[in-house]
Structures are given as C-alpha cells and as structure tokens.
Image: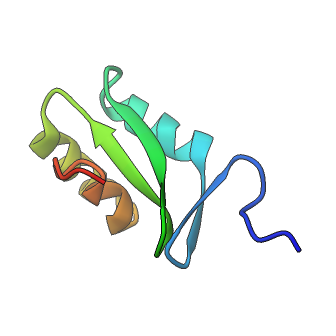
C-alpha cells in the first residue's frame, strides 16, 4: 500500500502542494528566502521557512492568497 504523496508533492494536513511551485512563489518574493518540509507525525509534513524579514514575507504571501499553512511556515516557530 502506498501512503505517501506523489513525488514532488508535500502533504500537510489534508492539503497537497507541488513543492517546486511553492518554492518558486517564495523565491519570487524574496530570492534569499528558504522553504522546506519536515516529517510530522500527526499531519504528514510541516513547512518551515526562513526569510530576512519574516513579517514582510508573511504579508506578501497573504497578499497572493496562498494557503495559510505556507504563511505559517515563516512564523519563526520550530517544527
């Protein structure tokens, strides 16, 4: 039985994201920003991100209408 998401996708809770698309969005806002995903026992995986100005990154991501789980990656909390 295959239980993981297809290659190149990230599963966070009940959502699936094409990882390259999300990374491209983040990189388009701040070329120095980094986005990754870590395993999480309850929700599959969890996004985490770093940016020079986390508040500006979150504001810009919200303005694009992106899923709040991606915005939360830049909240400064450890996974």
**Rendering coords of residue 34 (x, y %):** 37, 31
* Residue 65 at x, y percent in the picture: 35, 63
**Residue at screen point 76% across, 71% down:** 3
How many numbered marks does the figure carry?
Answer: 0
Q: Quadrant of the C terminus?
A: bottom left
Quadrant that contains the N terminus: bottom right
Whole-percent x and y of residue 63?
26, 56
Q: Nearer the viewer, residue 67 or 35?
A: 35
Going 60% across and 40% down the picture, which residue do you hit?
20
Q: Is residue 20 left or right of residue 62?
A: right
Quadrant for residue 11, please give it: bottom right
Q: Report the residue at 26% width, 35% height from top.
A: 50
- The vertical placement of 42 against 75, above or below, is below
Q: Which residue is at 23% across, 50% downward?
A: 78
Q: In the rendering, at what x and y percent does residue 51 appear?
A: 23, 31
Outermost residue toward the front? Answer: 41
Residue lying farthest to the top in this orientation: 32
Of residues 49 and 67, the one nearer the viewer is 49
What colour scheme governs how the chains and residues are painted in the rendered image of this protein? Answer: rainbow
Is 49 positioned to the left or the right of 28 in the image? left
Q: Is 74 left or right of 29, judged from the image as shown?
A: left
Q: Residue furthest bottom?
A: 14
């Amino acid at each position: 039985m295959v239980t993981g998401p297809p290659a190149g996708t990230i599963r966070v809770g009940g959502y699936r994201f094409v990882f390259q698309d999300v990374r491209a969005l983040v990189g388009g806002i701040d070329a120095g920003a980094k986005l990754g995903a870590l395993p999480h026992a309850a929700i599959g995986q969890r996004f985490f991100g770093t940016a020079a100005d986390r508040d500006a990154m979150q504001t810009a991501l919200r303005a694009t209408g992106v899923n709040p789980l991606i915005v939360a990656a830049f909240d400064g909390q450890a996974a």
